[in-house]
Amino acid sequence: MLRLLQILVIVVCIGFSTASAQQKVELELVLALDSSTSVNADEYELQRKGLSEAMRHPSVLRAIRGLGEEGLAISVVQWSGPGKQVNSVPWRHINNEAAALKLAQELANMPRALTGFTDIAGAINFSVASIERNAFDGRRYAIDVSGDGTSDNNNPSAARDAAVAKGFTINGLIIHSVEYDLGDLARHALHTHYQNDVIGGPGAFLLHAENFKTFGESMRQKLVKEITGPLFANLRHQSQNVTP
């Protein structure tokens, strides 16, 4: 009996130590990049290059400095069809310019990992699980879903709603592909899909990139908005301070 109690004490202490060892950050951010078949090799290269350049941009570096010493934790996920998601860049703690530039170089060298169908729900679920398992303790949680098409079969609204219920914000970046451009009606349908079924949570927003060549500039704007994020940051802090 004494031996059992000793084991229980050790287990509790280990669990407490693990929890208290989590690095506190202002924001935990997943960048979920569309790697489905509709994104050809050149377009993937433009995504990779655009993301790397956005991370180096003075406005993004300035936003990171504004977070102070805690900074943010960031990871990059590539996604395509059901069961096809991968952490292309593991979780990184970014709280100064040197760390951001190192991440930018890592992004510039990031190989393509996937092709396949389009499953935004799977991307959201995978990103939520990645945030829940990481070694960081953030005040805000955001998932940045970028893509050039609607989900093939699985409507992502249920996955979105489950994530929002846990306190996550999901933002969207639509990329209008020249190769698969089916006209204004298709553009409107894609916007409606992201607006109604993908984005959600406090302060959620949706941006458009007119094509893959302008992805980097759109991502730069998106990163600045997500990192500074006063609206959904304040809402989240208020919800945490509400007395039941």
Image (tube, rainbow, N blue to C red):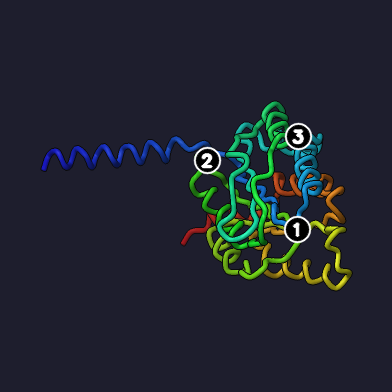
Where residue 212 appears, x then y in whole percent?
83, 51
The residue nearer to you, when weighing 165 against 156, is 156
Q: Residue under circle 3?
A: 61
Density class for disc 1 (Cα within 10 Å; few <14, some 14-19, many ≥20) is: many
Which is more foreground, mark 1 or mark 3?
Answer: 1
Q: CA distance from mark 1 to mark 2?
A: 34 Å
Q: As shown in the figure, which amino acid type bears the numbered disc 1? A: Ser
Residue visible at 83% across and 54% down in the picture? 209
User: Tag 2 or tag 1, which sits nearer the N-term?
Assistant: 1
Q: As shown in the figure, which amino acid type bears the numbered disc 2? A: Phe
Q: As shown in the figure, which amino acid type bears the numbered disc 3? A: Leu
- For this view, does 41 lie left or right of residue 161? right
The residue nearer to you, when weighing 27 against 172, is 172
Quarter occupied by residue 232: bottom right
Q: Residue under circle 1?
A: 38
Where residue 7 appears, x then y in whole percent?
21, 39
User: Tag 3 or tag 1, which sits nearer the N-term?
Assistant: 1
